[in-house]
Amino acid sequence: MQPGDWGYVIGRVHTGGNILADCPPSADPGQPPYCDVYWVVVGDGVSDLSENELEVWYSPGDRFAVQLKPPNSDQWTALLEPRQFIENQELEGGIFASIYNELYNPANGHNTISVYLSPLFSPQGVVGVRGGTWTVRLVARDVRDGRYDAWIERDDPRRLGKTGLREAWSFPSFFAERYNVDNSSVNSLACGNLVISVANLDPAAGRIHHTSSQGPTRDGRPKPEIAAPGVGILAACGFTPGKRWLGMTDTSMASPYVAGVIGRMLALDPQLTAAQIGGILRRTATPLPGGDYHWRDDAGFGAINPAACLAEVRRLRQREDRTP
């Protein structure tokens, strides 16, 4: 792994499957079906001082139990049934685990399992999260559907210095390559029903940049909706003394582009609703090279066309003005 080469792990944040269809065969006919989720924390001389978080979401009609096993260990935590939890349980080696098995999340009514791995900070020293592959086992209890999706909180890698002889980092954990499912990685904030999710377009290459996330949402809604330029964007620099501008590449650069276009649309017609704005963006989008007008999980409905967006708003206003 070379400094700055984080792309291969930052993108491995989603997995999923079906606890009935994907469970391993068991020699014990009394063993309930289960699926293992393999969660990798960086080791090999690196001490991870960030809190690592994993969330599993599944149907409200199902019931899963859950337990956790550290790397290179045969010791599992207690098997937690729905509505049970452990909080800041100290594991071998000095770090802490918290697991919450919750039903009927207030936001969407679905069930969720949250797993946290926390480093130890004490006057005697600092212990990072153990490197290696952690196993999260999902055990079927009462299953009608069986499908589940899991996501890892995505952090930016950041070097913190040294703790003892080890390099200390705030580092993203990720799913083992075999178990990564390469879709549905759009940030939860961008998955809102009336939120516009924006993909990072590289206009020079005519394709979506690798820093961009993919849809759809867990319930199958098309996210992202639109793509906008976000590669090598000149932006104001507010954190380096004496440096006024810098070039940046990310969806954080593409999203302001779309926000600016929407601002101009609202200047023409302040009565536009979020739903109408989303509809206009879809209608006026330009397919990427080799694409068509169908939604794609990386590019949405295509590249934003600012002139066409504004022209569509003007046409909409003209039609409304002629309405008796």
Image: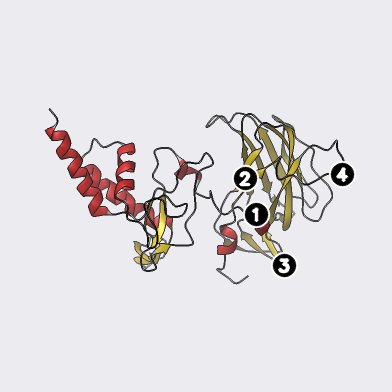
- What x and y, as percent, mark residue 14? 59, 50
Mark 4 or mark 3: which is in front?
4
Mark 1 or mark 3: which is in front?
1
Q: Residue 150 shows which numbered tag?
A: 2
How packed mark 4 is, by other alpha carbons closer than 10 Å (few <14, some 14-19, many 20 or more), is few
Q: Which residue is mark 4?
A: 27
- Amino acid type, label 4: Ala
- Extreme right residue here? 28
CA gap between label 4 and label 3 equals 45 Å
How packed mark 3 is, by other alpha carbons closer than 10 Å (few <14, some 14-19, many 20 or more), is few
Q: Earlier in the sequence, mark 1 or mark 3?
A: 3
Mark 4 or mark 1: which is in front?
4
- The picture quadrant where one finds residue 280 is top left
Q: Residue 175 shows which numbered tag?
A: 1
CA gap between label 2 and label 4 equals 27 Å
Q: Quadrant of the N terminus?
A: bottom right
In the foreground, 75 or 295? 295
Q: Earlier in the sequence, mark 1 or mark 2?
A: 2
Q: Which residue is mark 3?
A: 165
- Position of 127 with respect to 218 (left or right) is right
Q: Residue at x 34, y 42 (%)?
A: 278
Asked if the residues shown at circle 1 and circle 2 are in contact, with their CB atoms under 8 angstroms apart, the answer is yes
CA gap between label 1 and label 3 equals 27 Å
Asked if the residues shown at circle 2 and circle 4 are in contact, with their CB atoms under 8 angstroms apart, the answer is no
